[in-house]
Image (tube, helix red, strand yellow):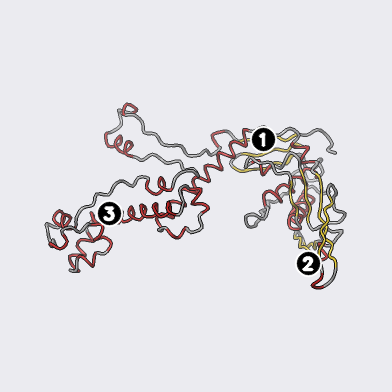
Amino acid sequence: MPPKRTRARAAETPASNVPLPPRHARAESDSGDSTAPPAQRRRAEEAPARQRWTLTSTVEEVLLGGVGPIRDIKLNDFLRDKLSGRGVVEANENLSMNAFARRPERYVTDPELREDILSLPEYQTEYPRREDARKLRADARNLMEHRVGTLQDWKEFDQKNIVSAISRTKLQSALAAAEKAESATRIQAVGMLPVPNGFYDSVFNAKWSHVLEFPEGEGEEMEVRMEVKEGQRPTQSWQYTRKGARFSPVGGAQQFRAPRPRLIVLTSEKGWPYPLRQGKTIADCYVTREVERVWRIVKGDLDGAFGPRGREDPDLRRRLLIGTPGIGKSMAAGSYLLHQMLRHDDTKLQVVVYCFGAGLAYVFDK
């Protein structure tokens, strides 16, 4: 039992330090700053509003936002306007500049004239942009045909290579912004939620269970029987060899044979801190041999820092847990470390802080 009644509390940095989702930019009225120079006011009025993307934003909004209608002019009209009519031929009278931009060598066979057209600043700035707009429109139609209507659909879509590079870039950038905004909103919401009643005690007194493995038979006939020991802490843990601060698990199948567990489960009825970030309550924390190994390393640091030397300022080092997404760095290892640190000698370790990032943390005051 804990030595005294204890509690967990949410801690936040000032609101100004908490990143918030981007908001729609809103143009000021003309009366907002009549003293500004006309050119400056014009730039402010013409500046596009900053879009706030969400997972429900449509693909068309992302790809075609800011892409206005393209006025299709004819090649001969362009030559009359920019090159005083040089190169005008009757066969190209109805040829659009969009068609010319896709295959210029087909419609203007004179290399010198073609180079003059392609080198014009008006052509270099306008017609690549026209080609980009054409690709964006075509990709938007293509995605709709594949039932990809929103950024959420795009996130789950496996055939992302069916669209052009410019469309992929815009969609991935919008998706990243939407997920970042959603995460920031979720974290902010977590910070405003009250800590569940009895949360500390639930984590501190988490119930142990474990799974034992019993091989039966030999060779190809061998079967493995699994037995769940609910509410019981394993009588033996996994074995490790230690060299300095390094812990390496002992190999071999015997590591997972009874009475050593195959898996350990810690159950907190009120949940663990990590899932609260997603607005969920997950009661079970799964502890594997690797998760236990992480705790052994951290415990070694704590024992060294708060050892018999009686140092007033303990020498604590920072540890970085590396792994791939989905292996349980946050839910499994983070929850298990929290539980074990709360159980650590409270004359040496009085406070444990569980950080979510973005200025939000739970402070477990022992």
Discs 3, 1 touching: Cβ within 8 Å? no
Q: Is residue 97 left or right of residue 309?
A: left
Helix, strand or loop for disc 2: loop
Discs 2, 3 touching: Cβ within 8 Å? no
Q: Earlier in the sequence, mark 2 or mark 1?
A: 1
Residue, disc 3 = 125
Q: Camera-side residue: 325 or 220?
A: 220
Q: Position of residue 167 (x, y in %)?
A: 41, 54
What is the spatial separation of the Cα atoms under label 2 and label 3, in whole angstroms? 64 Å
* Image quarter of residue 225: bottom right
> Which residue lies at the image location 78% right of the left edge and 51% below the top edge?
299
Q: Position of residue 247 (x, y in %)?
A: 76, 60
Residue, disc 2 = 251
Q: Which mark identifies residue 10?
A: 1
What is the spatial separation of the Cα atoms under label 3 and label 1, in whole angstroms? 54 Å
> Which residue lies at the image location 70% right of the left edge and 38% below the top edge?
363
What is the spatial separation of the Cα atoms under label 2 and label 1, in whole angstroms? 42 Å
Q: Earlier in the sequence, mark 2 or mark 3?
A: 3
